Image (cartoon, helix red, strand yellow):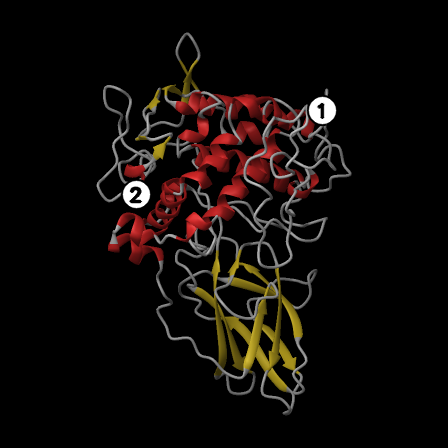
Amino acid sequence: MGSLTRTIKNLFGNPGLDKARKIPPALPVITGPFEISINTLSSGNAYIGWTLSSCSIRITNQPQANRDVILKNRDTSTGGQIIFRSAFGSANQDTLSLTLPGDGSPVNFFIGGKFGFPSTDDQDGGISLTDAATSGVLHQRTLMVRVRKNANNLTVGERDRFLHAYATLNAATPDYQVFLDSHNAAAANEIHHRPSFLPWHRAFVLSLERHLQTIAIDPSVTIPYWHFDQPSPKIFDPDFMGGTPNSVGRVPFSGTNPLRNWTIFGVTGVTRRPSFNTATSGAQWDGGTGLVAVQSEAVTLALGPGWAQFEDMELDPHDTAHTCFSSGPLISPATATQDPLFFLLHSNIDRLWAKWQQKMNRYDTSNTATYSPQPAPAIGDFLTDTMWPWNGVTASPRPPTAPGGPLIQLAFPSKPGPTPTVADVIDYIGKTQGNSNYFDYDDVPVS
């Protein structure tokens, strides 16, 4: 991973995008003799989603008298917003009253992003600690409510920071090679058309996201999703995933788009020819007698209340979304990750699963309606099976190589672990299994 320590500026020399990558809070941060820990981290930038994060607060200049305080959003008019809970199972509150012991003992509480109010910039939200009697601000801690969003709706800054990070990973060739080698012809039988398809690809998208979020790239980015049953003109644009292809199918990028340097196996450029009008239509595939719309979100979520019905979504909309292009690497599992659009497509596949889970309350892995390795399961499908390639297993029936090593871990307790199991990614919000995977979607609540 040492190649990731190169800075984006050195790679691309674009000060405009460098500025978009890191936007400091607009207001000065007030600091006092207090310590607020978020997910066990008492300093540095903080990142949360809708999922609850464990926090604590304490007085640092003890001894003194106990202090009555109120926790609030740092600014309710802008930035990512949060809710507070005094205990994990208590009700959401916009403010939280606490008494801090004068001896410095910590007081525990929980925060989560306020659904519908995510951040747009790094550290644009935060916690303000105020005096209960005077309402004076005593201390503040910034944070980002970081969730995966519809790629077509990103702000320019969000889009450019993502492109910046993604292109940086691609330029660090050995690091992106992991994602090519984990989704090639040798891996096809391990990851497609079997019960573990959705869990495996959830871990795969999470793996890329954690690569992008390493400090050397940009911790503020997530993997946005291509809502492929809707028109997406801002995605299929030279400033994002590429515009209308030329006569040989190569899509154009603007001169300021870092993807203009996208290189796979020494060849620079992206080829992709949509079968549909990307500006006015959702994805469509060639059904032989004409174009057929990719299965809509509404139909996908209505496939059925149980896993046995819902897992059919691998055929449609997943397979059909890949084949709504007449040429380019996306149409083949062996080459699909060569196109930067791949992970936006799979972020949406995972979002549909997450949305179905929320709609049907499918998080309890002891319930076969949540997940079942039937029919015809193999090693890698069962709940307790570790997933290739993160487990490093290369003995048959696994693929002959296991690129990339263990899954990148966060700086605080979370799941999945370095060698994720199928079960680790099913209850991704930790509703029944404790720690979460710490990713969320802009339109999928966690309660």
- Left or right? Give the position of 69 relative to 308: left
- In the image, what residue type sits under mark 1? Ala
Q: Which mark is residue 128?
A: none
In this picture, is 320 found above or below 198? above
Q: Few, some or many C-alpha atoms within 10 Å of disc 2 (few <14, some 14-19, many ≥20)?
A: many
Picture quadrant of residue 103:
bottom right
Spatial separation of the CA atoms under disc 2 and disc 1: 41 Å
Badge 2 marks a residue whose secondary structure is helix
Residue 343 in picture, x, y percent from top left:
46, 36
Residue, far top: 289
User: Mark 1 highlights which residue?
Assistant: 378
**What residue is drawn where x is 41% and y is 21%?**
324
Residue, far bottom: 64
Q: Is residue 335 or residue 157 the one in the foreground? A: 335
Badge 1 marks a residue whose secondary structure is loop
Picture quadrant of residue 97:
bottom right
Residue, far right: 366
Can residue 284 be seen at all in this image of the molecule?
Answer: yes
Q: Few, some or many C-alpha atoms within 10 Å of disc 1 (few <14, some 14-19, many ≥20)?
A: some
Q: Is residue 235 or residue 7 the one in the foreground? A: 7
Residue 142 in picture, x, y percent from top left:
47, 68
**What residue is drawn where x is 74% and y is 39%?**
365
Residue 446 in picture, x, y percent from top left:
60, 49
- In the image, what residue type sits under mark 2? Pro
Can residue 355 be seen at all in this image of the molecule?
Answer: no
Residue 192 in picture, x, y percent from top left:
58, 24
User: Mark 2 highlights which residue?
Assistant: 258
Q: Earlier in the sequence, mark 2 or mark 1?
A: 2
- Left or right? Give the position of 241 relative to 323: left
Q: Is residue 258 or residue 53 the one in the foreground? A: 258
**What residue is drawn where x is 55% and y is 87%?**
133
